[in-house]
Amino acid sequence: MANIQSDTEFRSNLSSLSLGQQRRVGKLFIDHVLELADNPKVKKAVAIAGETEPSAADIAEGYKAASTAATETYTLCGREADWRRQASHFVAAAAAACLSPEVKEQQCGDVAWTTAMNARMARVCEKIAEGEGYDNSEIGVQYRILEEFLRTTS
């Protein structure tokens, strides 16, 4: 397996995975930003995403918990932003995307992609909160996570 060098390659590799595999790799993306979550509901939901064969009830429960956490941490646009809270919101949104219970077959490829994008946004918010410039390092981390996942599942 060659190194992933672009989002086009990244997304193509993600779309080749089954829904269960997408949830498991999505969990790995979330694990890398999980310290930015300030809600224990998110951590519980993320654990479900990593299970090999979670039940539909567990997925629904995890999705509900993550969605609730995302709603609770949402900062209204146009107001003074609490960037740390926004980071927590995006981690919760990533967990909700990863556990979306009503994924249609044609949308399967979007589960891990949407999870990854929310994880990236969480990292951007963290960098803003710290007064740092965003360096795209989360993208490279996600590429390496996916490469390792593909090596271990092949």
Image (tube, helix red, strand yellow):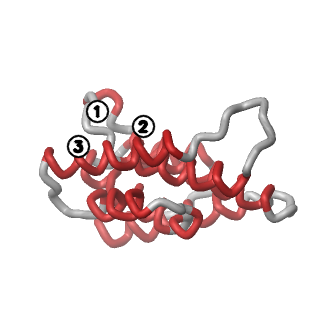
Residue denoted by label 2: 110
Q: Residue 56, image x and y in percent?
A: 14, 45
- Picture coordinates of residue 93 (x, y %)? 49, 45
Q: How many marks?
A: 3
- Secondary structure, mark 3, is helix
Q: Is residue 60 left or right of residue 43?
A: left
In the displayed structure, would residue 132 be above or below residue 110? below
Q: Amino acid at mark 1?
A: Val
N-terminal of the pair, mark 2 or mark 3, is: 3
Which residue lies under the disc numbered 3? 60
Label for residue 148?
none
Q: CA distance from mark 2 to mark 3?
A: 18 Å
The amino acid at mark 2 is: Asp
Mark 1 vs mark 3, CA separation in Å: 12 Å
Q: Residue at x 53, y 61 (%)?
A: 37
Left of 67 or right of it: where is 54?
left
* Contact between labelled residues 1 and 2, with CB atoms less than 8 Å apart: yes
Left or right side of 77 for 6: left
